[in-house]
Image (cartoon, rainbow, N blue to C red):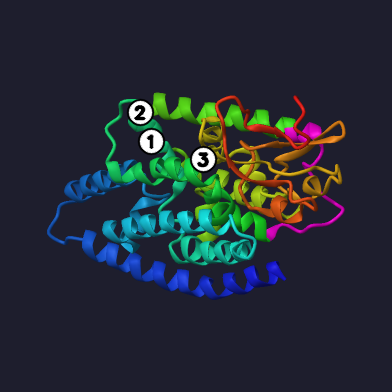
Amino acid sequence: MKNIIILFISVIFFSFSNINYSYSKTQVDTVQVDEFKTWDEEAETQTETQTQSSCSGTCPNAGSCEAENEENNTNYWIFGTLLATILAGIFVRFKLTRNFRNVFLLSSIVFLGFYLGACPCPISHFENSVLFFAGVETHWQNVFYFLLLIPITYLFGKVWCGWICHLGAIQEFLFLPSKFRILQDKLSQKILKYLRYFLIAILVLQLIFQKELYWCSIDPFWSIFNLDIDFTNYTISAILVVLILLTSLFSFRPFCRAACPIGISLGWISAIPGASIIGVKGECSSCKMCNKTCEINAITQFGKHSILDNKECITCGDCIDDCQKGGLDFKRKKVSESHIVDCNNLKI
């Protein structure tokens, strides 16, 4: 049923995206063409425009995105998304309102994904934040999306990942729960975890030394949501699109678990005292229900006990609903506590 909805949405927004893109492209061409300019002046202007676009960090293919969304309008969407994240942080704390998670995810796919064309890109805001702290001059509007997610995550948990992120939502709706599943065993989980840290280290080093947003030129999510893949000029992007779409069918949020720098960064916040985490507030009957419920594999089996790693948790709330004893709930992390929780209150 979820995949039918996604297909239906894709068909509708395919025509919308093409019309919108064509209209925006016409506007850009109209603005840039000047019949009185010499060839050298026009080439220089185009070069300057491309340079500014590549450094803006608002999204992949920033030139076309800026034609579609004015700067102020983009900021309104960012603040609206942050307010929706806070609302999700409230909703996830109550059993009744937790049922609205799919509504949040579907809305994210529709508006943040297909309607806005995945712009502004949250990953580019993460990259600009790295450049900012590395001493590179960066406009404040290119970093506040990611930076404001930090206090929100501290107060409410990683709800942005589990309720709002359109990159994660598209993967989740493509996922087909079945017996044939990949990347689920313990070895795969360990490999994915190390791979994620390796890739984020490579990304940070690339940003520091090259001072360029390389991800923006190969972003597969831009291609997915704009239904536009240039196999000639963006071979890497095309490969990533195919890889993400295929693995999402048989693995829950593979990009989130293997490569997303935002999920890693926000996960570290759970280790700070006072942060919102999911912990034990009742009894555990060792039914393993929470293990089966947690699709992101934040809850794993350690002997006869269920171990919850809040760094991996996306705060979907499913484990709270499915715990037969009502033993899991939100709490504030104490200084003496670990972000890794043994559901039987035993030391790991």
For the point 47% across and 25% down, the residue is 205
Label 2 close to label 1 by CB (< 8 Å): yes
Task: Name which residue type carries label 2.
Answer: Phe
Please tell me which of labels 3 and 1 falls first in the chain: 1
Q: Mostly what secondary structure, the magenta segment?
A: loop
- Which label belongs to residue 309? none
Q: Is residue 50 magenta?
A: no
Find disc 3 in the rendering and name its residue: 262
Q: Quadrant of residue 267?
A: top right
Q: Which residues are magenta?
A: 174-189
Q: CA distance from mark 2 to mark 1?
A: 6 Å
For the point 44% across and 50% down, the residue is 121
Residue 293 percent coordinates (x, y) = 77, 51
Of the 4 image quadrants, the one containing the C terminus is top right
In the structure shown, which secondary structural element does the residue marked by tag 3 occupy? helix
Find disc 2 in the rendering and name its residue: 133
Q: Quadrant of residue 119?
A: bottom left
Q: CA distance from mark 3 to mark 1?
A: 11 Å
The one nearer the camera, 320 or 139, is: 320
Q: How many marks?
A: 3
Residue 54 percent coordinates (x, y) = 35, 43
**Along the horizontal axis of the image, is 70 left or right of 258?**
left
- Which label belongs to residue 129? 1
The one nearer the camera, 163 or 174, is: 163
Task: Name which residue type carries label 1.
Answer: Ser
